[in-house]
Structures are given as C-alpha cells and as structure tokens.
Image (cartoon, rainbow, N blue to C red):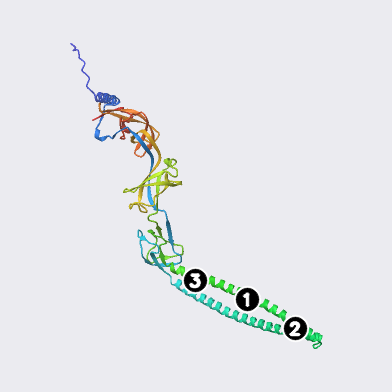
C-alpha cells in the first residue's frame, strides 16, 4: 500500500537572507532621511558660532596687507672701478649725512689727481708769463706813443713861430710848409699808434681769455679726478637707515655698480595689496587705517598701481610726519581702506562663505525652543568682519554664522543641545 508523502518546508536560502538585509537597510535609510528632512539633527551649542543682528553706523572697508617703505630712497653706486677695502656699516644701521659706509681703493686715482694738479700749475705759470710779456709789449708801445706826442708838440710850437716870422718875411714859404707838413705827419703817427696800442690791448685780452679757458678746463679735470678719489669713501647723502648693502670685502667693483640703498626713517609711506575685485571701489584721498600690530596710523590713498599682480593691486598710502616708534621701514602691516560709511543699518558678523551683495540661507536660532530654522537673508556691503543685512532679519534676532554647508541642503531645522 502506497504512503502519501507530505511536502517538506523549503529551507531559508542565502539569497533570501541578503534580500532581507537590503529591505531592512532601505527602511533604515528612509527613516533617517525622513528624520533629517524634519530637522531631527542635534548639534552641540559649544560647536556653533551664534551672533545677533545689530544696528548702527558701519564703515565699509577693503582689507589689505603690505609693508612700510621709505618715501625717500637713494641708491648708492660706485663712481669708478675700485676694490672694497673696508665695510664700515652693515644693513639696518642708522646713518647721518656724511657717514662713511664703505671704503674703496684704487691707486690710479691718486696718480690722476697728481697729474691734473701738475698740468694746472703749468698752465697757471704760462698765464703769469704771458701777462708779463704782454705788459712789456704794451709799455714799449706806450713809450713810442709818448715820444711821438712830444715830437708833435715840438713841431706845433715851431709851426706857430714860423707862421709869425713868415708874415715878416724872415722865414720862406717853403720852410713854413715843410714845418706844417711835418706836424701833420706826426699827428697821423700819433693817431696810428693810439689805434695800434688799443688793438694790442684787445689782442692781449683775447690771448688771456684763451689760456684761461684752458685753465678752467683743467680745473674741471682736476675736480673730476678729486671727486673720483673722494668717492672711494662712500658716504651717506642724508640721514636715514642703510636698508641694503650689495658688496663684500675684497670685491672688485666696476663704475656704476650698486653698493647699497639708503632710505628715510621718519618719512614713510605704506604699500598695501588689496584684492583686484575690490580695487575698483578705491579712489584717491580715501582714509586708510594702517595697523603695525602695536599702533594704528591714519593715512590717505595717494596712488593706485594700474598693474594687477597675482590678482592683487598695490595701493600707496601717505602717512603723517609724526609717526609712532613702532613704524619703521620694511615693517609688515595691515591696511583698511574706508570706501563708504553706512548710517543706522542692520548688520551681522559676517557668516562663513558669504560675500557682498548676495543672498544666503542662515539658521535662525530660537532660544525658547532651542532650535534653528533656515531663513533666507539678503546681504549688502561688507565692512570688515561685518556685513550689511538688507532683508530677511530683524534687530536682535540670532543666526548661526558657522560653516554648515555640508548639511544646509538636507537639513532645514537644527536642534541645539
């Protein structure tokens, strides 16, 4: 007799096991998503930055960084070929006008000065000799002129005497005419000698001018040689600080080679770099606050560099004459250029990832419920650490300004623990 076989229950397979795990995981993920969307995310209070909406005057500034530099600078260079014999002062040293910085040596320069002095002495001797010769020639001409004048006077007396005797018939007509002709000839010689003496004086004067011109040129050669010799002692041209020294002991220098740089100590300007995107808001004359980390100095925008370097623009700031002790050349400083002043506006300490004239979602914090809900805020101009609030917030309301970009798109409500 046949037995009826009962069906055996199917075993739980490995495939069914993994299917069950996936279903459970899906439910968990869905549950977490639902909880997030409804703001069931809790964050510790101490990990958040919460600031209140304030109202008042706000200065819109452009932040920059840079350094103080000397407004007056002089580059020192070698006037002639030489070798560095001694380094007297090093970079950073305060110098007075005439302070020796470096001593150089070049034996040829002393020889050039000696040669120029000898040539000048020779020209001076030639001038003295020429003047003596000219004086002798002039005395000779003046003696001849005096002699002819005496002869003319004698001839005139003789003519007058013969003229009276001619009327009495004592002197013949021929003798009188000869005497009168002799007087005329002597008078002409006197005029000629006067003219020749005057021309001789002019010739002498021109000769002296020519040789003195050569003497002036030699004075110039001597002055150049002495200047080159004196330049072996490199001196400061004004009081300041030695900012740079470009030579070493024993180094050979060529004419025009840089030796160092001297800059003023009290006469300073600030060169700060500002972002290119904000540079167009800066104009000449705007007030600037320079922070030396010890003191704060008020200055004005004096120049805007037209060249953009690494997305920054250099701004030159003029500073007052009376500067604090902390201000010195090459000091790194921060700068804040005031481009506008806003009166009685709402503002908030600038949240993370916000810029001027943009809208953003911020979490508005409610102390009563200990929750923060997203709220759209429209911002205006940025003012340093603060930013103007145009729409979306009221005075004394509190907002989270921490960087919450990783949860902002998925969580609309936060619970603050």
The residue that disc 1 covers is 201
Q: Which mark is residue 160?
A: 2
Q: CA distance from mark 2 to mark 3?
A: 66 Å
Q: Which residue is mark 3?
A: 222
Q: Nearer the viewer, residue 355 or 184?
A: 184
Nearest the viewer among 50 and 328 is: 328
Quarter of the rendering occupied by the N terminus: top left
Q: Name above or below for residue 65 compared with residue 101.
A: above
* Residue sitting at x 56%, y 80%: 129
* In this view, the mark in front (1 or 3): 1
Residue 166, given in percent of the width and then of the height, sits at 80, 85
- Assess disc 1: are there few (<14), some (14-19) or many (≥20) residues with their C-alpha within 10 Å of its C-alpha: some
**Residue 411: quarter of image:** top left
Residue visible at 36% across and 33% down in the picture? 344
Mark 2 or mark 3: which is in front? 2
Q: Say whether disc 2 or disc 3 marks the residue closer to the N-terminus.
A: 2
């Amino acid at each position: 007799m046949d037995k009826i076989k009962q069906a055996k229950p199917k075993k739980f397979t490995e495939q069914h096991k993994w299917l069950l795990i996936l279903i459970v995981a899906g439910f968990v993920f869905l549950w977490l998503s639902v909880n997030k969307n409804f703001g069931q995310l809790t964050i510790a209070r101490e990990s958040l930055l919460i600031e209140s909406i304030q109202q008042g005057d706000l200065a819109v500034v452009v932040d920059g960084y840079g350094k103080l530099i000397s407004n007056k600078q002089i580059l020192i260079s070698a006037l002639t070929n030489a070798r560095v014999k001694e380094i007297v002062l090093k970079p950073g040293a305060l110098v007075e006008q005439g302070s020796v910085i470096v001593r150089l040596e070049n034996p040829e320069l002393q020889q050039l000065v000696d040669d120029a002095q000898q040539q000048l002495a020779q020209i001076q001797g030639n001038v003295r000799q020429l003047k003596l010769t000219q004086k002798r020639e002039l005395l000779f001409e003046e003696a001849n002129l005096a002699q002819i004048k005496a002869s003319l006077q004698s001839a005139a007396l003789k003519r007058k005497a013969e003229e009276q005797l001619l009327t009495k018939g004592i002197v013949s007509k021929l003798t009188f005419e000869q005497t009168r002709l002799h007087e005329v000839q002597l008078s002409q010689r006197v005029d000629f000698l006067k003219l020749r003496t005057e021309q001789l004086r002019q010739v002498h004067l021109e000769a002296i001018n020519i040789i003195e011109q050569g003497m002036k040129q030699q004075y110039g050669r001597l002055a150049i040689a002495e200047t080159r010799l004196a330049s072996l002692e490199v001196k400061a041209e004004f009081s300041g600080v030695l900012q740079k020294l470009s030579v070493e002991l024993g180094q050979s220098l060529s004419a025009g080679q840089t030796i160092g740089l001297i800059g003023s100590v009290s006469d300073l300007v600030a060169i700060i770099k500002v972002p290119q995107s904000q540079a167009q808001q800066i104009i000449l004359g705007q007030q600037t606050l320079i922070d030396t980390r010890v003191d704060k100095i008020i200055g004005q925008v004096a120049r805007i560099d037209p060249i953009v370097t690494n997305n920054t623009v250099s701004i030159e700031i003029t500073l007052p004459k009376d500067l604090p002790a902390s201000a010195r050349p090459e000091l790194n400083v921060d700068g804040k250029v005031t481009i506008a002043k806003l009166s009685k506006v709402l503002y908030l300490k600038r949240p993370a990832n916000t810029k001027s004239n943009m809208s953003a979602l911020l979490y508005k914090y409610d102390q009563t419920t200990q929750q923060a809900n997203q709220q759209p805020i429209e911002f205006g101009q940025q003012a340093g650490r603060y930013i103007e609030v145009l729409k979306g917030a009221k005075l004394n309301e509190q907002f989270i300004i921490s960087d919450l970009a990783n949860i902002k798109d998925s969580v609309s409500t936060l619970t603050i623990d």
